[in-house]
Amino acid sequence: MSHTFLLEIGLEEIPAHVVTPSVNQLVEKTKAFLDAQRLAYGEILPYSTPRRLGLKIVDLADKQADIEEEAKGPAKKIALDDAGNWSKAAQGFCRGQGVSVDDLFFKEIKGVEYVYVKKFIAGQLAKDVLQGIKEVIMSIKFPTMMRWASYDFEYVRPLRWLVALLDNEVVEFNILNVASGRVSQGHRFLGQTVTLNDANEYPASLLPQKVIADAKERKDLIVTQIKDLAARNAWNVDIDEDLLEEVNNLVEYPTVFAGSFDEKYLEVPDEVLITSMKDHQRFFYVTDQNGQMLPNFISVRNGNEDYLENVIAGNEKVLTARLEDAKFFYHEDQQQTIAHYVERLKKVTFHDKIGTIYEKMQRVAKISAFLGEYLGLSSAELADLARAAEIYKFDLVTGMVGEFAELQGIMGEIYANLANENKAVAIAMREEYMPTSAEGQLPETNVGAVLSIADKLDSIQAFFSADMIPTGSNDPYALRRQALGIVRITLDKGWNLSTTLLQRAIEQAASQVPELYENIDPSKHQEERAAFIVDRLEQLLSNENLRHDVISATTAVKDNPFVQSKQASEVLSQHLADADFKETIEALTRVTRLAKKAPEFCDCEEVDGALFENQAEINLNKAVDEVLANYAKQNVVQKYEALHSLKEPISAYFEQTMVMADDEAIKNNRLLQLSIIADLTRVFGCLEELNVK
């Protein structure tokens, strides 16, 4: 017979962004609990609102699965004394297993007899096992925790009720002063308490009390209502998924409504209107069929349609006040020039250990100029890059960004266009902040991409030099995100940037404006900074399900560009299953290990064929020359094939050749030959990191 188990955790209102991750965590921990307890089930259905986290376990077994197993004890010679009686060791084994010595028997393993006992453990009833769900509830972790009353226990919000029903029977347990039962709560204002007679009544029993406990059902209802409202008014509504998720987790019984604002506010840029509605008020903005902004918005009420006109009026009043501020700042900001705002940045501190934002812009200008030249930007792009670097933070001291911090960069682009800056310069104002998240949009223009890399690189260098290095989960200045941004932009553009090249850019800037680096020495924590950026590359590659040893190998050489390391990882991964992959890597790594013993060679030195003593040396030298003829022009795929072609001549070489010969000239000639091959493998990082056993 199968059963249904219902769990509902009643709480004070949970922050919207916490609801979905929390119920997902509850489900995953419950699955782990049931599996560990050997309690079979069909599926687990999640339920969540701002005031409750719940789940329903369907097709739950009557009891745990029984266990029949054999337990191994001490060897026979230890289990029996000289008189053939059971020893203390055997008796202790029996006590530990809950059996008597009469249950013991012997089994031979590899010529040695051991004591064994057969154990049968009857499964507990589901009702008894489920009392342990209390530990699951208490083990959930939240981004923010709180304590209440005199309790030391921490949770996201205070517990108010617990429902735990196995079919129609309460599973009893207590958490603090809250006992599990069958009583749930309806909507805070529109509902009443609900007594559940059976777990299968949930969530339908909450509906009359104005609670839709199924988050997906609630979200679908919101979308349907928005689309119906938009269709009636011939509106176009962008249903932003993140906003929809947030709104859904703010309500238990959604009712969609529309409001409006004065058309005079449409003169404010769309980005400002959208931010005011979406980010500040959680409204969906409205456009006509041509994409033009309309003086309307759509919102969601946590309740029914009663007195909805009062709700609409209240929301309109709040939005109007915010739009009035936006309109004022928009006009006020344009009374000053960009140069005025840049001058003000001289008094705005970036960080008290680092300097002002103006000084940061000066450093970034030098870094970006170096990178732009290195990457081959056109003269027009370099000119735009130089201008963008001079002004790109100016909007931080405008009234609009002071009021709407989310618009930094966006207002920079808008105001730059109004000031008749080149379009590329204006776009760079916005793109410099990209990406704003781990998977956020990347800059499209070369000017914006270089400026973004330079700004992020300067931040990382400055904070590291000031000994403010991220540790563990502590990263207050989002340096990990900025490092990942550098890597992602570089890969997206296909640019040959490496940690070595980035360090050169910093050093070049420091040589030009040394006074700006007095407190942030570029040589300080240089290795840690390089490793920090490479770690982000490794993280990105690991997200593509590449093997750990492949990633370690291809990112081991800091001179290698990020894009090359990524390509090398992909190429090696494609050949892992080759029949001769192991032999190829072993041959090449044998070369690289021996090459480490070579003295320093200059580029002018050549392998001397007159010192060869066998045909294998001649053949390898010829094969290497053939590879070298085209190697510099080849892509990573072709370079792997070229190195693969050296497997046989390398193997023959080692069979016939003693590299470390007594004759110093012959030994060095051979080491030079191996060093040339080792240098060819550097495109794949350090092949010795590969696990080919």
Image (cartoon, rainbow, N blue to C red):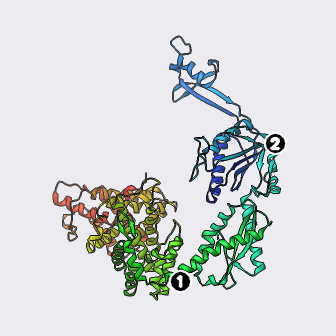
- The residue carrying mark 1 is 331
Q: Which residue is depicted at the point 45% across and 53% down?
A: 472
492 horizontally vs 371: left or right? right
Q: Please indicate, yes or no, whether residue 200 appears anywhere in the rendered image.
A: yes
Identify the image quadrant of residue 286.
bottom right
Foreground residue among 270 and 592: 270
Q: Nearer the viewer, residue 554 or 601?
A: 554
* Residue found at the very far bottom of the displayed protein: 420
Which residue is pictured at 35% across the width and 77% down the height? 365
Q: Secondary structure at mark 2?
A: loop
Quadrant of the image for the N terminus?
top right
Q: Position of residue 293 (x, y in %)?
A: 65, 82
Asked if one can make out residue 556 in the rendered structure from this viewpoint, the answer is: no
Residue 348 location (% of width, % of height): 40, 70
Percent coordinates x, y for residue 183 in the rendering = 78, 45
Q: Which mark is residue 483?
A: none
**Closer to us: 581 or 87:** 87
Q: How many marks?
A: 2
Amino acid type indicated by mark 1: His
Residue for badge 2: 168
Residue at 57% across, 41% down: 152
Q: Quadrant of residue 470?
A: bottom left
Q: Is residue 267 above or below residue 225?
A: below
Q: Quadrant of residue 223?
A: bottom right
